[in-house]
Amino acid sequence: MIKGSCCCEAVKFELLVKPSMMGTCHCSRCRKVGASTIVFVKREDLKWIQGKEHVALYQPAPPYKYGRCFCNMCGTSLGEILSEEDSFPIAANVFDTEFDLKNQFHEFVAEKPSWYEICDSAEQSEGHPKSS
Ligand SMILES: [Zn+2]
Ligand SMILES: [Zn+2]
């Protein structure tokens, strides 16, 4: 069981299995909400422990379409944890349990600030991996 929680621990959940993939997005929006490194989880593997009512959603104006969830008490970024999709990204920062998964890609590296240096050998794409 992999445990996840926000900074103030109002929000707690578990994953029944290890996430399938980890990647890092260097776009300004992921950077500003503090959710650049994400893991992909299946909705059926996510088990809520407490605090779902504390999860707020910021839905940006088009053309941006990805909703950003966060704890309404402490502001911890939670990725798309309220998504109704079968699989969705969660911020990798929120896990309390260690698991064996390494970053597998970097996307939107064209928007990466110069102070952040990529120090792994994961695949890089200028924008979204699927469109480049
Ligand atoms: Zn919190
Ligand atoms: Zn991004």
Image: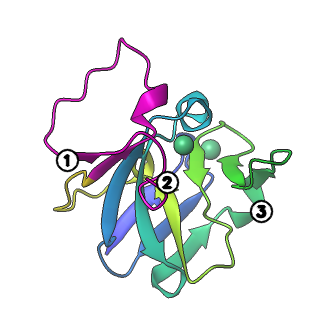
Residue 17 position within the rendered picture, expressed as x and y whole percent measured from the top left: 32, 80
At 84% from the left edge and 48% from the top edge, which residue is drawn? Answer: 62
Between marks 1 and 3 in the image, the one whose residue lies nearer the viewer: 1
Q: What x and y, as percent, mark residue 36? A: 46, 40
Closer to the camera, 69 or 120? 120
* Residue 125 place in picture, x, y as percent: 36, 44
The residue that label 2 is drawn on is: 5
What colour scheme has been applied to the protein in the rendered image? rainbow
What stretch of residues is rendered in magenta? Answer: 105-132
Task: State the SS at label 3.
Answer: helix
Ligand 1 is found in which quarter of the picture?
A: top right
Q: Which mark is residue 53?
A: 3
Instruction: Please name the residue that numbered disc 1 is placed on.
Output: 122
When the figure is inspected, residue 119 is found, relative to residue 9, above or below; the finding is above
How far apart, in angstroms, are the residues tagged by discs 2 and 1? 27 Å
| Dot 3 amino acid type | Glu
The answer to which image quadrant residue 16 occupies is bottom left
Query: How far apart are the alpha carbons under marks 1 and 3?
Result: 36 Å
Q: Which residue is nearer to you in this view: 64 or 96? A: 64
In the rendered structure, the answer to whether residue 56 lies left or right of residue 83 reads right
